[in-house]
């Protein structure tokens, strides 16, 4: 499964097609996405397996750890394969207490991009997502100042493309008037469907949508219904949730994360899981029930 990311997406001037099943590096850091991993050798081995499995899209951030995941990526994979897309995000930092304060000031944006470049050992980052909003939902906050800083860094050649994270459709439209937006990364899954309309609108514009927390926010009843469907397919609930997302819209790219090779291969196998229209609609109803009950 492949998808062209953005209307004019390229790496070093070359048109690029990204495979729809990618890898999210957040869980390579320690507990709570803070500090070093419990098993550094396994973290490196996971990244080697990612590349060996044909994945060409890794999502990361220098505030994971902080700095930890990017340093592990560099250790494991540098020099990088020419067709590897590395996507990072900025807009937050980590406090000494493992908190996640926002970091959207001009100097903070510039520093974050340079931290990513240094720890990944890159001359330019393929995509930088500007992270806004709350922990899970957009807040429609002002964002033009940090976006303009990113646009300037793009002109300098330090980043190639710009994306947005935890944003509303209105914010995407506002940002698109100033620069090309190649992807949007928000919380979305079978049970959390606030972005249904946005996904369809982005698909028409050939903008990728990258959902995070594919199982986040499910209630026990929803989990039970998902598990029942998974049992009929001889698959795990996570695999079924990922397969539903792939079938939901062709512009959806996935970045499931894990710190174990076994779990990695289970996640990647979801790309081979074909859902019938009947099963897709049955899963779809889990989310529709949630919406109608609000």
Image (cartoon, grey):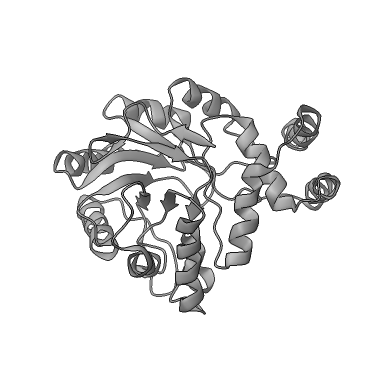
Q: Is residue 233 left or right of residue 21?
A: right
**Furthest residue toward top:** 204
Residue at 54% over, 58% down: 257
Residue 151 position (above or below residue 63): above
Residue 249: x percent and y percent?
58, 29
Q: Is residue 128 left or right of residue 33?
A: left
Q: Residue at x 48, y 61 (%)?
A: 26
Whole-percent x and y of residue 70?
35, 64
Q: Is 261 on the left-hand or right-hand side of 183?
A: right
**Residue drawn at x 53%, y 45% as measured from the top left:** 21
From this viewpoint, which residue is outermost toward the left?
Answer: 156
Specify whether residue 219 is in view.
yes
Front residue of 220/259: it is 259
Image coords of residue 78 (percent x, y)? 30, 63
Vertical position of residue 32 compared to residue 4: above or below: below
> Is residue 94 shown to the viewer in this render?
no
Q: Is residue 90 above or below residue 68?
A: above
- What residue lies at 30% left-to-right and 24% top-to-bottom? 177
Side of 226 where 17 appears, left or right: left
Q: Quadrant of the C terminus?
A: top right
- Quadrant location of the N terminus? top right
Foreground: 201 or 269? 269
């Amino acid at each position: 499964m492949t998808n062209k990311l953005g209307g004019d997406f390229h790496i070093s001037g070359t048109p690029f097609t990204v495979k729809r099943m990618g890898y999210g590096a957040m869980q390579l850091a320690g507990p709570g996405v803070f500090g070093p991993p419990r098993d550094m050798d396994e973290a490196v081995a996971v990244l080697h397996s990612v590349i060996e499995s044909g994945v060409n899209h890794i999502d990361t951030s220098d505030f994971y750890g902080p700095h930890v995941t990017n340093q592990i990526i560099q250790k494991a994979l540098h020099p990088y394969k020419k067709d590897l897309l590395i996507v990072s995000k900025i807009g937050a930092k980590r406090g000494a207490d493992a908190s996640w304060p926002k970091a959207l000031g001009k100097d903070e944006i510039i520093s974050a991009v340079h931290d990513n470049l240094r720890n990944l050992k890159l001359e330019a980052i393929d995509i930088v997502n500007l992270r806004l909003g709350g922990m899970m939902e957009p807040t429609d906050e002002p964002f033009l100042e940090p976006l303009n800083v990113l646009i300037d860094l793009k002109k300098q050649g330090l980043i190639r493309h710009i994306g947005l994270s935890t944003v509303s459709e209105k914010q995407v439209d506002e940002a698109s008037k100033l620069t090309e937006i190649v992807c949007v990364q928000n919380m979305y899954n079978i049970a959390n469907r606030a972005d249904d309309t946005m996904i369809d609108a982005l698909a028409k514009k050939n903008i990728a949508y990258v959902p995070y927390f594919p199982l986040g926010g499910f209630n026990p009843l929803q989990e039970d219904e998902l598990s029942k469907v998974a049992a009929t397919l001889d698959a795990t609930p996570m695999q079924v949730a990922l397969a539903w997302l792939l079938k939901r819209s062709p512009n959806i790219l996935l970045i499931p994360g894990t710190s174990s090779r076994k779990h990695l291969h289970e996640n990647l196998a979801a790309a081979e899981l074909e859902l019938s229209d009947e099963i897709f609609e049955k899963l779809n109803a889990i989310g529709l029930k949630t919406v109608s009950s609000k």
